[in-house]
């Protein structure tokens, strides 16, 4: 049978109070009985002294010299006088243990017993008899004169009232003990209930948490150890809830990542399949014509070269992505002048810009330091500036601005083109997402901004794009500076 803590406390209190009560009654009863026996023995001693004094006075007053012969003749008067003095009804035994001739009835307690034999040896003794509601003491007291045993005086005395008062005391103490014990149990139950109530709440809360419900208010305001336990329980609840939320978010991220990888793989497969299909098709066509059609041969070779170059660029971009995903890139970080890197990239890209009658306008603050990878940041800048050249209208400038604000270096690259459509603006950092409008005879892989974002993320920076229709696009790169 399963017992609750409350049941266990109730059982413990009951047993404790019950055992204490029984032990108390036992020892009180023993003490009262001992006191009653001592009272009877005190009476025996007093009566023994009185009989000795009375015997001496009686023999002197009656001028009894020959006690052994004369006492037989006066023993009746002696016993009568002694009974009057002691207010008792007693009998006399001679020194040989025989009862003297007397008119008094010898009751059932006057039979020969151990106490009589002790008294015949000149020592007072008594026996206590318990009969239903009565308690009687049978006294046997030797009558001695000048150290000679004359006889033994025996009588019975009722001590029922003495014992009844003891029984009444035990009864009163028992009632008091029962009431006290009941009160202790009731008070203990009240205290235990007040203590166990918050524990019961914690149990209910833990059951609710086990069912996945963490939106519970724990209203335990105890100022003791249970209150501390409740506070720790709240901390545990919050930590578990936080960890579960973290696990859920991590699972969602993993799911998204898995879905993203699948989409990426599908896109890569599709993007690689297109140039390979074109190359394979034109190769087969050239083989079938056996080089007889010069125009078709020239056209096929141009397509094969174009698609081969496109395929090569795509493979190089995929290698860059793999490089960025490698955790070893961060180990190649070093502090260098970002100002010099931006200036160098602008100079290199000006060759391509000039082909389209463009200039790269620069506003680069001096002494811009970063802790990063030179090659990666160079690739990121080339990707952004190359896109600006591709999608900007001919003859318009490309603006590159770089300055420090607080602990951030902010780089802004602006082109003056058609802008990015709203439906693509939020997806520009996804792989293989590109604007289909061709302003020049160029074609991108759709991986440039995707790689750029990975590079900036690896440098603990941020990248975002603003675009205005028919006015151009702003690309913002924010990178932590190094003092």
Image (cartoon, rainbow, N blue to C red):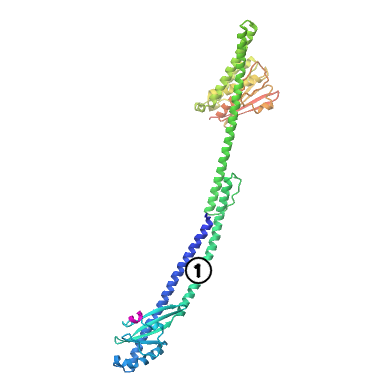
Which quadrant of the structure image shows residue 436? top right
Is 37 above or below relative to 199?
below
Q: Secondary structure at mark 1?
A: helix
Q: Which residues are magenta?
A: 113-118
* Crowd around label 1: few <14 · some 14–19 · many ≥20 (10 Å): some
Residue drawn at the location 47% of the way across and 67% of the way down: 22
Task: Describe residue 18's horizontal placement relative to residue 283 as left or right.
Answer: left
Question: Between residues 312 and 105, which one lies in front from this camera angle?
Answer: 105
Question: Between residues 209 and 396, which one lies in front from this camera angle?
Answer: 209
Residue 344 shows up from this direction: no
Question: Disc 1 marks which residue?
Answer: 177
Task: Describe residue 430's horizontal placement relative to residue 26 as left or right.
Answer: right
Is 139 above or below relative to 309?
below
Question: What kind of secondary structure does the magenta stretch mostly adopt?
Answer: helix
Is residue 462 rendered magenta in the image? no
Residue drawn at the location 64% of the way across and 19% of the way down: 390
Which quadrant of the structure image shows residue 74? bottom left
Residue furthest to the top: 292
Pinpoint residue 93: horizontal percent, then vertical percent.
Answer: 34, 86
């Amino acid at each position: 049978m399963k017992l609750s803590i409350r049941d266990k406390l109730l059982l413990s209190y009951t047993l404790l109070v019950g055992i204490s009560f029984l032990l108390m009654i036992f020892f009180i009863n023993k003490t009262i009985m001992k006191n009653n026996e001592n009272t009877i023995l005190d009476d025996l001693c007093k009566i023994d002294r009185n009989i000795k004094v009375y015997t001496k006075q009686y023999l002197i007053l009656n001028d009894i010299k020959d006690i052994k012969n004369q006492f037989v003749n006066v023993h009746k008067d002696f016993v009568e006088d002694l009974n009057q003095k002691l207010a008792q009804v007693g009998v006399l035994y001679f020194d040989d243990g025989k009862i003297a001739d007397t008119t008094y009835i010898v009751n059932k307690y006057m039979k020969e017993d151990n106490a009589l034999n002790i008294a015949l040896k000149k020592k007072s003794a008594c026996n206590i008899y318990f009969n239903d509601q009565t308690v009687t003491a049978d006294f046997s007291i030797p009558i001695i004169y000048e150290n000679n045993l004359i006889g033994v005086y025996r009588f019975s005395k009722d001590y029922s009232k003495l014992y009844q008062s003891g029984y009444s005391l035990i009864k009163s103490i028992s009632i008091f003990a029962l009431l006290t014990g009941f009160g202790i149990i009731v008070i203990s139950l009240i205290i235990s209930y007040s203590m166990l109530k918050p524990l019961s709440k914690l149990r209910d809360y833990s059951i609710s948490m086990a069912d996945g419900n963490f939106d519970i208010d724990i209203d335990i305001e105890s100022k003791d150890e249970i209150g501390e336990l409740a506070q720790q329980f709240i901390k545990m609840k919050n930590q578990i809830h936080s960890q579960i939320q973290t696990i859920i978010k991590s699972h969602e991220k993993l799911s998204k990542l898995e879905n993203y990888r699948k989409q990426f793989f599908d896109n890569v497969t599709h993007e690689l399949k297109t140039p390979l299909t074109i190359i394979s098709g034109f190769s087969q066509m050239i083989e079938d014509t056996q080089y007889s059609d010069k125009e078709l041969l020239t056209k096929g070779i141009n397509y094969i070269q174009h698609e081969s170059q496109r395929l090569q660029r795509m493979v190089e971009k995929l290698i860059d992505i793999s490089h960025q995903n490698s955790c070893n890139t961060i180990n190649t970080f070093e502090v260098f002048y970002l100002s010099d890197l931006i200036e160098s990239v602008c100079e290199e890209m000006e060759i391509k810009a000039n082909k389209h009658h463009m200039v790269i306008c620069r506003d680069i603050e001096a002494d811009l330091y970063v802790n990063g990878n030179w090659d990666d940041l160079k690739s990121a800048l080339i990707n952004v500036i190359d896109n600006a050249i591709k999608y900007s209208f001919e003859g318009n400038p490309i603006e590159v601005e770089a300055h420090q604000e607080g602990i951030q270096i902010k780089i802004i690259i602006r082109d003056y083109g058609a802008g990015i459509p709203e439906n693509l603006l939020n997806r520009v950092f996804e792989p293989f997402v590109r604007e289909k409008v061709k302003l020049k005879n160029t074609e991108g892989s759709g991986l440039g901004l995707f790689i750029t974002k990975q590079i900036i993320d690896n440098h603990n920076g941020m990248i975002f794009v603003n675009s205005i229709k028919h006015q151009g696009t702003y690309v913002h790169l924010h990178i932590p500076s190094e003092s």
